[in-house]
Image: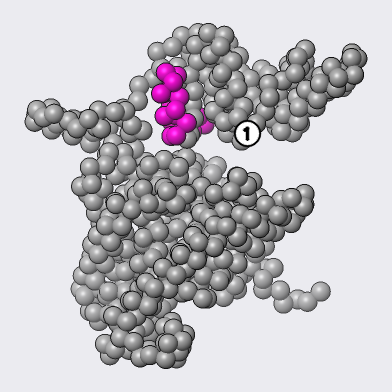
């Protein structure tokens, strides 16, 4: 076995240390990504001990960005993207311009040339794909209006940075600042057309290339990619299906970058968005999830590797100014822009908090600026320090926005009552951002999750006349339930503030119909703590999940596979006119009689 294995040592060292410090951060009630960043600092060249390969780590992290954007595309349709273009396009452009102006001003104060100051400002203007999406996913906001606007905003920022990466080398050569690289980013395009293009031509050709890629994906990709995945699914091989998902995500991203000059992240996003039109999109998302999580961790480790802690001591004031631009300047600008478009305050606060950090595109711009001789190395160090500190502060920014929202809404309410006016009809309709009050039901049932399982439970409760309410993280389903006159709350039931809205002390039962066992255990634990006499029914997919749910307070746990098997036995007995005895005695001995519920009639038809 060879001793020089930089790829293996980088992956092993990064993941092991990320796990240790991520678990420690979680234990201290901090976001695990802080532990991942610390792990990166420890394996970086600026701290003693083991040093990971600095050329491999960023490439591994880029795979994580590709897979993450592919997953977002699977849940983000073209209709969703077009529905937010009215705010995402002008909003992102205005916010980029404002942040770039602030960064240019700071660079000018430090005596940097104009080109370097502008590159510095651009690097501070674009948010991290990984951080923004991770924050939205943790809060179950990706499929909400707020999430769609934030993701659309992010796509516009990515397109703007793709354009900047093409124009900066050309501007450096034409303007006389710095030096053009031996192989500028536009060289391939110029050779293709055999033209000496100016800045105007560079902009035009870049836009044409992006438009060609989008058109190719929408015309041919939306037919070819789903067709390919259906053919693979028909082979019955899960291994081939998983491989096909990864091949499409990585292949389209790489091809988009090489052939059209589009960013890897943007290419993967469109691949996922095209595949989302297939009914296999949910399965594709599940198959790619483990690798998405693993490589996203490597992204944070690679960021930490670039950070030199000494800059915190050597240059404290410039670092504070940089953080102020990223966390305060960008966030306030985004807040005011969204409010200017007459969007609810909660939407404005969510977007402003989401954008209050920088990441992968910032590192690319910083590296390009240094290579071209435009940006001093001090600028790159400030960008890295600002990125890491802003990523660490981002959860705190969300927390502050949640705390400020009631105060700001109260102020706006006072202003609106001081000016009597007839509100537009659409503003009187309830929305996801209206003030939410706890339920007034008593002796009711609570259904957590309204997917295929929760829907059947809810329909039977409604038929029996049992009062019930639903907690669901999809705003679309919540809207449909409210339209039917069913009380429903939007949010993650594992969050204490959401679960408290269900009036747990007055409830008689709770059905936890979500498939995520970790969240189900937390919900069961909180429900039992709030109401010791409540009946808790949950679902599981394995013996280990059954045991965990019982330990956390569940009274009855139904394991899907065994219940399906019992339903099949019932049906076979009807066909053959025989009485079939259930062989569950061993299972009940180890898990208790309430673990499995078997009925004397076939179970409801499953979708």
Residue in the picture at 44% in, 34% down: 476
Quarter of the image containing the N terminus?
bottom right
**Residue 39 makes an appearance in the image:** no
> Which residue is tagged 1?
515
Local packing at callout 1 (Cα closer than 10 Å; few below 14, some 14-19, many 20+) is some
Residue in the picture at 55% in, 19% down: 458
Q: Position of residue 163 (x, y in %)?
A: 36, 72
Q: Position of residue 320 (x, y in %)?
A: 29, 61
Q: Position of residue 192 (x, y in %)?
A: 46, 86
Image quadrant where residue 534 sits: top right
Image quadrant where residue 595 sits: top right
- In the displayed structure, 51 sits above or below 531; it is below
Image quadrant where residue 565 sits: top right
Q: Is residue 475 left or right of residue 201?
A: right
**Residue 284 makes an appearance in the image:** yes
Quarter of the image containing the C terminus?
top right
Residue in the picture at 46% in, 74% down: 261
- In the displayed structure, 25 sits above or below 307; it is above
- Furthest residue in direction left, as rendered: 419
Query: Which element carries disc 1, helix, strand or loop?
Result: loop
Q: Position of residue 555 (x, y in %)?
A: 66, 17
Residue in the picture at 45% in, 45% down: 142
Q: Is residue 64 magenta?
A: no
Q: Is residue 491 magenta?
A: yes
Query: Which sits in the foreground, 8 or 296?
Result: 296
Q: Which residues are magenta?
A: 475-494
Q: Is residue 392 left or right of residue 507?
A: left
């Amino acid at each position: 076995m060879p001793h020089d294995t930089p790829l293996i040592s980088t992956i092993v060292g990064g993941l092991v240390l990320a796990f240790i410090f991520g678990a420690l951060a979680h234990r201290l009630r901090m976001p695990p990504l802080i532990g991942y960043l610390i792990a990166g600092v420890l394996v970086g060249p600026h701290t003693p001990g083991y040093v990971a390969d600095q050329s491999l780590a960023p490439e591994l992290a880029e795979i994580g960005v590709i897979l993450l954007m592919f997953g977002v595309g699977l849940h983000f349709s073209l209709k969703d993207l077009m529905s937010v273009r009215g705010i995402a396009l002008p909003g992102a452009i205005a916010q980029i311009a404002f942040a770039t102006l602030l960064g240019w001003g700071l660079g000018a104060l430090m005596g940097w040339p104009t080109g370097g100051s502008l590159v510095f400002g651009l690097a501070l203007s674009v948010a991290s794909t990984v951080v923004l999406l991770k924050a939205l996913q943790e809060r179950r906001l990706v499929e909400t209006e707020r999430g769609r606007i934030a993701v659309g905003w992010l796509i516009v920022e990515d397109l703007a940075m793709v354009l900047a990466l093409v124009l900066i080398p050309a501007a450096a050569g034409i303007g006389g600042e710095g030096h053009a690289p031996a192989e500028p980013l536009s060289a391939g395009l110029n050779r293709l057309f055999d033209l000496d293009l100016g800045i105007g031509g560079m902009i035009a050709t870049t836009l044409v290339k992006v438009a060609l890629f989008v058109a190719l994906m929408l015309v041919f990709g939306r037919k070819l990619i789903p067709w390919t995945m259906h053919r693979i699914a028909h082979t019955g091989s899960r291994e081939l299906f998983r491989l096909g998902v990864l091949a499409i995500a990585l292949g389209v991203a790489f091809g988009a970058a090489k052939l059209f000059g589009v960013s890897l992240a943007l290419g993967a996003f469109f691949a996922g968005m095209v595949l989302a039109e297939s009914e296999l999109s949910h399965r594709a998302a599940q198959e790619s999830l483990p690798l998405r999580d693993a490589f996203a961790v490597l992204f944070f480790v690679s960021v930490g590797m670039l950070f030199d802690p000494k800059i915190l001591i050597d240059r404290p004031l410039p670092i504070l100014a940089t953080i102020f631009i990223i966390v305060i300047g960008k966030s306030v600008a985004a807040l005011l822009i969204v409010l200017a478009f007459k969007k609810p305050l909660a939407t404005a606060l969510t977007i402003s908090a989401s954008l209050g950090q920088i990441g992968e595109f910032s590192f690319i711009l910083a590296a390009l600026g240094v290579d071209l001789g435009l940006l001093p190395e001090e600028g790159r160090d400030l960008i890295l320090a600002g990125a890491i500190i802003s990523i660490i502060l981002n959860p705190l920014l969300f927390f502050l926005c949640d705390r400020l929202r009631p105060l700001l809404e109260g102020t706006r309410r006072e202003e609106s009552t001081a000016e009597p006016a007839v509100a537009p009809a659409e503003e009187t309709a309830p929305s996801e951002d209206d003030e939410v009050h706890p339920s007034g039901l008593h002796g009711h049932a609570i259904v957590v999750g309204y997917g295929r399982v929760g829907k059947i439970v809810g329909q039977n409760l409604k038929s029996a006349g049992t009062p019930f309410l639903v907690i669901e993280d999809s705003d679309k389903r919540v809207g449909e339930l409210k339209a039917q006159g069913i009380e429903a709350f939007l949010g993650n039931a594992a969050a204490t503030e959401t679960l408290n809205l269900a009036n747990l002390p007055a409830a008689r039962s709770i059905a936890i119909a979500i498939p995520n066992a970790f969240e189900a255990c937390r919900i069961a634990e909180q429900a039992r703590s709030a109401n010791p006499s409540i009946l808790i029914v949950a679902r599981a997919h394995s013996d280990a999940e059954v045991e965990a749910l019982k330990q956390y307070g569940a009274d009855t746990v139904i394991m899907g596979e065994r219940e399906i098997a019992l339903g099949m036995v019932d049906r076979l007995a009807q066909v053959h006119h025989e009485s079939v005895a259930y062989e569950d005695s061993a299972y009940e001995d180890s898990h208790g009689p309430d673990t499995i519920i078997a009925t004397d009639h076939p179970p409801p038809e499953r979708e």
